[in-house]
Amino acid sequence: MNTDSLFRPFSLKSLNIKNRIVMAPMTRSFSPNGIPTADVASYYRKRAEGEAGLILSEGTVINRVSSSNDANIPHFYGAEALAGWKNVIDGVHAEGGAMGPQIWHMGIMDNHASGWVPSQPFEGPSGLNRPGFNNGNTMTESDIADTIKAYGQAAADAKELGFDCVEIHGAHGYLIDQFFWEGTNERTDIYGGKTLPERSRFAIEVIKEVRKRVGEDFAVIIRLSQFKPAAYTNQLAKSPQELEAWINPLADAGVDIFHCSQRRFWEPEFEGADLNFAGWVKKVSGKATITVGSVGLSGDFFGSFAGESSQASSLDELLKRFDRGDFDLVGVGRPILADPFWPKKIHEGRTDELKGFSPAALGELVMS
């Protein structure tokens, strides 16, 4: 298995990375009261030492009271939290790595198992987390305007702190995705509509605000998914034509890189071609893409929450698709969560040392 192509540098605007491996965002509830700790900084620094080319942080929430359903999810606002993130990025840079925060608003959520709830109700386009499940408020146009500004401020803070890029979380049934999905966006104003391009207005305004705040030369990524945790087989765009009508306005608004989330990267997005989600987005937009979804493992991410373990698996199919130009970067989640030196081992051909993934790794910040 020749992996040399994965270890070529990649540069785009502010982003200059030594290889094509991206540590994918994975929620780590280890930031009490939203403040990233020294352990969190060490966790990310160790992944830079392990040769992850680009680290995308766990989701870190913007300055809206109800943007989080978990008291231990990190904030990306406030002096203490931003000081914690400054420690994180300085440690990553000290190891020669690059990093961007994934800025996040969860939208309408289920109440957390801990019993903690924010001091104001959850907010979303129509109060829905999934069809038939209402657990919060419908956002007013004023709420929407303030939220857009909060995304922009988080992006500006990321640049000010020295991060190399910023990622907007627009996937997996969270706030931006709740606007995209007809199952959770029942609005009849300018932020709703019968078509996906109409329901993309909120995302487009977020992207434009982020771009305005960071300038033209700072790399902006958005993470998207067709599937929802509540609907694995969902397709927002049901054809290449619908995909193009959804993606290109986001690109025009200021997205540089599309992070295309799938449960399994090898699954074709549409009938008639074996291109995956990232492959199709690159084809219709011409923009750089990140593929992600069970890279290097036998089982998918959501199975891990059900207690399923995964074994290390071949990268041959990934390399075939990468080498023919389907995507530019490769997101790797659980293998790097469980083993900070996964990229280095791949680079050095030490595949016999690769670990599988145990759900126990979700409950700790693995350092070795």
Image: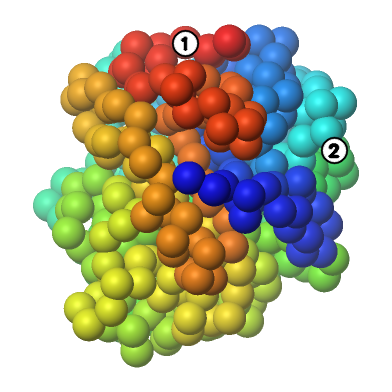
Measured as percent of width and height from the top left, residue 148 is found at 61, 59
User: Residue at coordinates 42% horizontally, 45% vertically from top-left?
Assistant: 315
User: Which residue shows up at 33% across the image and 84% down it?
Assistant: 240
Q: Residue at 19% across / 48% down in the picture? A: 230
The local secondary structure at tag 2 comes to: helix
The amino acid marked with disc number 1 is Glu
Relative vertical location of residue 141 with respect to residue 157 in this rendering, above or below:
below
Q: In which quadrant is the C terminus drawn? A: top right
Residue 140 at what x, y percent from top left? 45, 60
Amino acid at the residue labelled 2 = Leu
Depth check: 152 or 307 in front?
307
Q: Secondary structure at mark 1?
A: loop
Q: Is residue 253 above or below residue 260?
A: below
Asked if 223 appears above or below 366 in the picture, the reply is below
What residue did someone put label 1 on? 364
- Which residue occupies the foreground of this view, 73 or 301? 301
The answer to whether residue 83 shows anywhere in this view is no
Horizontally, residue 193 falls left or right of residue 147, namely left
Q: CA distance from mark 1 to mark 2?
A: 26 Å
Say which of 330 and 119 sits in front. Answer: 330
Mark 1 burial class by Cα count in 10 Å: few <14, some 14-19, many 20+: few
The disc placed on residue 161 is 2
Q: Is residue 336 left or right of residue 138?
A: right
Single out the residue that lies furthest toward the left: 132
**Quarter holding residue 347:** top right
Q: Does the image show residue 267? A: yes
Residue at (30, 50) in percent of width and height: 264
Relative to 175, 240 lies left or right:
left
The one nearer the camera, 301 or 83, is 301
